[in-house]
Image (cartoon, rainbow, N blue to C red):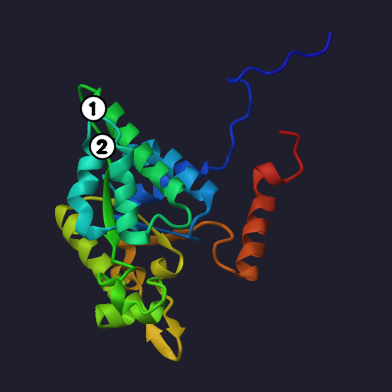
Amino acid sequence: MPPEDPTDDERPTSALQSPEEYLGDLCGRHQIVLLGDQVGVRQHLGFLASALAELADNGVENLAWEFTNSRRQAELDALIEAPEWDRRACADLFVDLLGAGFGYQEYADVLHAVWKHNEAERCRDDDRRPIRVIALGLPTYVEDPDLLDGRSAAELGLRNWSLGGHYRDMSAFHAASVLTAEVLRRGERALVYMSAAATTTGLVEWVDGAPTTSAGNLLWRWMADGCRRVVFHGTVADTAATERVEELISRSPEGRGGTD
């Protein structure tokens, strides 16, 4: 007779952490974890939504991101804590910052996943672990449409002009300030989901011959080991880094040609 298939208890366990476990472990050891990404990658946003329970298990009270406007924080809090999901209120938050542009639905799905997580936590009688979403975004448009003069409100030069300074620097200081007030001073933990460029720590990027800062630069120089950066594999165009990751995978127990 052919051998029976092994049961779940008999199957060998992986020597590697799952991505959710790895991210949760980082968040459990650092007060701020910066998760850098490309904009609008559906699978990455799906992963973020799936990792909420693991984050909560590791003491993460906050998910901060730059994709909703910080001036609408009260409305974002109300959306996440509402007894019923309000799709229209969710859409309004994105219209205020992005004009419901590229990737809107996937980002809305993350907010919906946070709402479902918090709804499940409300049903628990003890050890409730809700997650708050903190908005770090600055406006990407000009209030008076007549000032656009046919230009796109997403144009960097236009944003520099409308805000009275370099948009990238201003958004970095704004994000660091909000995180200080909403997370650090409360002694809480946060996963900060931003573009890869916004999460750089030891790296200073030069744009048009001038150095720019990032939220990661500011936090890392202040917090040192209290802040950690991680990026999705493939987010940063770095051939050497890709080769190192692939080498580590090939040397892992799962990558040595075994049958399991």
Numbered marks: total: 2
Mark linked to residue 187: none
Q: Are marks 2 and 1 in contact (CB under 8 Å)?
A: yes
Identify the amino acid type marked 2.
Answer: Pro
Q: Is residue 67 visible?
A: yes
Q: Tell me the SS state at disc 2.
A: loop
Q: Is residue 247 above or below residue 166?
A: above
**Circle 1 crowding by C-alpha within 10 Å: few under 14, some 14–19, many from 20:** some
- Position in image of residue 221 (x %, y %): 30, 73
The residue that mark 2 highlights is: 130
Q: Is residue 17 above or below residue 96?
A: above
Quick one: which residue is furthest to the top in this view? Answer: 1
Identify the amino acid type marked 1.
Answer: Arg
- Position in image of residue 18 (x %, y %): 52, 41
Viewer-proximal residue, 257 or 233? 233
Quick one: which residue is furthest to the bottom in this view? Answer: 209
Q: Is residue 59 visible?
A: no
Mark linked to residue 122: 1
- Pick whichever of labels 2 and 1 is earlier in the sequence: 1
- Find the distance from the CA under tag 2 to the CA under tag 1: 8 Å
Quarter occupied by the N terminus: top right
- Position in image of residue 28 (x %, y %): 34, 47
**Circle 2 crowding by C-alpha within 10 Å: few under 14, some 14–19, many from 20:** many
* Residue for point 44% across, 70% down: 197
* Residue for point 28% across, 41% down: 131
- Position in image of residue 180 (x %, y %): 20, 62
* Residue for point 35% across, 68% down: 216
Quick one: which residue is furthest to the right in this view? Answer: 1
Q: Is residue 218 left or right of residue 233?
A: left
